[in-house]
Image (cartoon, rainbow, N blue to C red):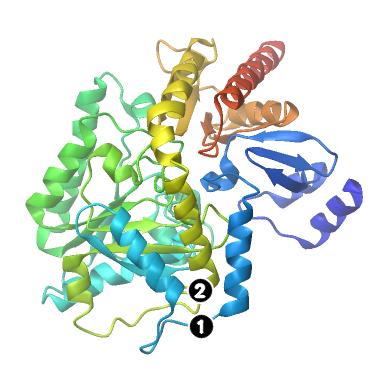
Amino acid sequence: PTAELQALDAAHHLHPFTHAAALNKKGARIITRAEGCWLTDSEGNRILDGMAGLWCVNVGYGRRELADAAHRQMMELPFYNTFFQTSHVPAIALSTKLAELAPGTLNHVFFAGSGSEANDTNLRMVRAYWMQKGQPERQWIISRWNGYHGSTVGAGSLGGMKPMHTQGVPTIPGIAHIDQPNWWSEGGDLSPEEFGLERARQLEAKILELGPENVAAFIAEPVQGAGGVIVAPDSYWPEIQRIVKKYGILLIADEVICGFGRTGNWFGSQTLGIQPDIMTIAKGLSSGYQPIGGSIVSDEVAEVIGSMEFNHGYTYSGHPVACAVALENLRILEEDGIVDRVREDTAPYLKTKFEALAEHPLVGEAKIVGMMGSIALTPDKASRAAFASEAGTVGLICRERCFANNLIMRHVYDRMILSPALVISKSEIDTLIDRAWQCLDETHAKLKAEG
Ligand code: PLP
């Protein structure tokens, strides 16, 4: 029974990114099964998952082939490590496939168990790279405020989520942040193009402030995800690319959300015209069926790192079961034509309907790239104003209306986020958008009633 499960959950289970006391008053919603884009809860409700779990279940729930791949691999070789001159078929096959899919000279994979771990690898790797090249003073890594790169101490320091910097653990040294390219909230009187350039040039200013000879790398998500699906103006990435090239610093694209079809190409870097030296991957790599992440690095980075012993690794680096499942997931994405269908068919269909949400009185901008989008809620579209209430109050109301209407959308402050499974059909998109309108109407009505 639901109440019993909720009581046990409240008694023993600490949830990530959750105010436990507030949750326990209501009780958690308990998800019991899932199929395609649909979740079922312990009360028998069918819920349309507009978030693909945590932006990760790209091929949708219930794919038997993935369970079979895990079972086969567990029976054959459930675990072996890839340390000390050993390897195994799943890690070899997956790294080979990733080298084939990744753009340019990104041909080498260092596996991890998650996106956070992979970004910790990157932190070590870029510094080791410069030491090995005889430039040990190149220690600084620049990232962006409101970017998210994970929750370990390293990845949390790398990220720009201020609440994570102020709770308990001090951030690690040698990381500097620049502002995010969020035109809607921070663009003021500048046009999006002017603002994009201004924000990109903060990178150059920061490099000059730190001394170009001291800077190792710049890391960013092609489209900021957990920060609210912030799509940079078109002027932004070409300017970033120019700057990293000019100063010879490494570019790390955190593709944990953007990778594996989410933006309509295999990687967000391809959609946005970015040429990274390193890509962080996780989530859609296995569609969330197994915990696995990694760093895909260029021939040049691999050569430098490979010329010494890189003192780094995880027990589960290249876990055979996770690799086998990820490989099967990539086969499904490719052979079912899912990435192509997103780019050519379902994402354009979703875009038209999603952008029309901007006509709702409560919605300012509605931005979407492929299958990741967000709408900014506002009391006044013309001035792009924020609500007078504490940031996130209205977003939370809207998320709760979504819950009540059996739709999962996430809120980041007062933005509502959408990131469905890539297999979502057009009729499911229609249902999703109808429900989103309903939730916005109900949120609007509640705000009006409360004055
Ligand atoms: N990087 C990005 C861009 C993410 O969105 C996330 C998680 O949401 C991470 C890294 C961390 O990945 P994980 O939660 O697998 O550690």
| Label 1: element kind | loop
Residue 171 in view:
no
Q: Which numbered circle lies on residue 386?
A: none
Q: Amino acid at mark 1?
A: Tyr
**Residue located at (40% from left, 13% from top):** 383
Q: Which x, y percent locates residue 162?
A: 45, 49
* Lower position in the chain sequence, tag 1 or tag 2: 1
Residue 320's label in the rendered image is 2
Instruction: Indicate whether 439 appears above or below 35.
Output: above
* Location of residue 47 (image quadrant): top right
Question: Badge 2 local density, few (<14 within 10 Å), some, or many (20+)?
Answer: many
Name which quarter of the figure residue 265 lies in: top left
Specify the farthest residue to the left: 246
Q: Amino acid at mark 2?
A: Pro
Say which residue label 1 marks: 80
Tell me if residue 204 comes above or below residue 379 in the rendering: below
Looking at the image, which residue is at 12% across and 58% down?
Answer: 211
Answer left or right for 289 relative to 302.
right
Residue 297 placed where, x, y %?
26, 63
Figure check: 365 above or below 44? above
Task: Give neighbour class at mark 1: few <14, some 14-19, many 20+ (Cα, 10 Å).
Answer: some
Q: Position of residue 238 (x, y in %)?
A: 17, 38
Apparent side of residue 57 relative to residue 90 in the rendered image (left or right): right
Q: Quadrant of the C terminus?
A: top right
380 and 237: which is toward the camera? 237
Report the residue at 11% width, 51% height from top: 245
Where disc 2 sits, the SS reads helix
Q: Are marks 1 and 2 in contact (CB under 8 Å)?
A: yes
Q: Is residue 272 above or below residue 190?
A: below
